Image: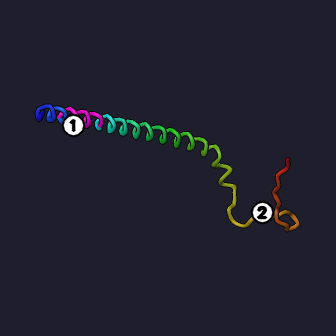
C-alpha cells in the first residue's frame, strides 16, 4: 500500500509539474503575442496620426473660438 501511495504521489507530482510548465509556456506565448499585437497597433496608429499632424499643428488649444459678433460658437446635433 505504501508503494502504491508513493507511486501515486510521484505520478501526481509529475503531472502537476508538466501542467505548470504548459501553463507557463502558454502564458509566455500569450504575452509575446500580446506585445506583437500592441506593437502593430501602435505602428498603425502612428501612421494614422501622421496624416493628421499638419492639421493638429494648426489647432489652437488656447481661448475658445467665438463667432464674428463675439458670441460663443454653439455646436448642436440635428436628427
Specify the quadrant of the image occupied by residue 19. top left
Q: Closer to the N terminus: mark 2 or mark 1?
A: 1
Which residue corresponds to the image point at 11% horizontal and 32% vertical from the top-left?
Answer: 3
Q: Is residue 14 magenta?
A: yes
42 is within the stretch colored magenta: no
The quarter holding residue 23 reads top left
In the rendered image, the vertical position of residue 21 relative to residue 49, given as above or below: above
**Label 1 Cα neighbours within 10 Å, binned few <14 / some 14-19 / many ≥20:** few
Q: Position of residue 48 (x, y in %)?
A: 61, 42
| Image position, residue 9 (x, y; %) | 18, 36
Residue 50 lies, with reference to residue 68, above or below; the image says above
Q: How many marks?
A: 2
Prevailing secondary structure of the magenta residues = helix
Observer-nearest residue: 3 or 49? 3
Label 2, on which residue? 65
**x then y, percent, for residue 49:** 60, 46
Please tell me whether mark 1 sits on a helix, a strand or a loop: helix
Does residue 64 sit above or below 45 in this rendering? Answer: below
- Circle 2 or circle 1, nearest the eye: 1
Identify the magenta region.
10-19
Q: Which residue is mark 1?
A: 13
Question: Element type at marker 2?
Answer: loop
Residue at x 85% of width, y 67% of height: 71
Quadrant of the snapshot with the N terminus: top left
Kindly identify the residue that appears in the image at 14 percent across and 35 percent down: 6
How crowded is the residue under tag 2: few (<14 C-alpha within 10 Å), some, or many (20+)?
few
Q: Which mark is on residue 68?
A: none
Q: CA distance from mark 2 to mark 1?
A: 70 Å
Amino acid at each position: 500500500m505504501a508503494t502504491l501511495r508513493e507511486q501515486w504521489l510521484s505520478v501526481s507530482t509529475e503531472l502537476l509539474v508538466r501542467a505548470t510548465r504548459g501553463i507557463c509556456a502558454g502564458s509566455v506565448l500569450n504575452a509575446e503575442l500580446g506585445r506583437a499585437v500592441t506593437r502593430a497597433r501602435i505602428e498603425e496608429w502612428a501612421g494614422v496620426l501622421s496624416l493628421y499632424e499638419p492639421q493638429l499643428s494648426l489647432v489652437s488649444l488656447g481661448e475658445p473660438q467665438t463667432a464674428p459678433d463675439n458670441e460663443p460658437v454653439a455646436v448642436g446635433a440635428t436628427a
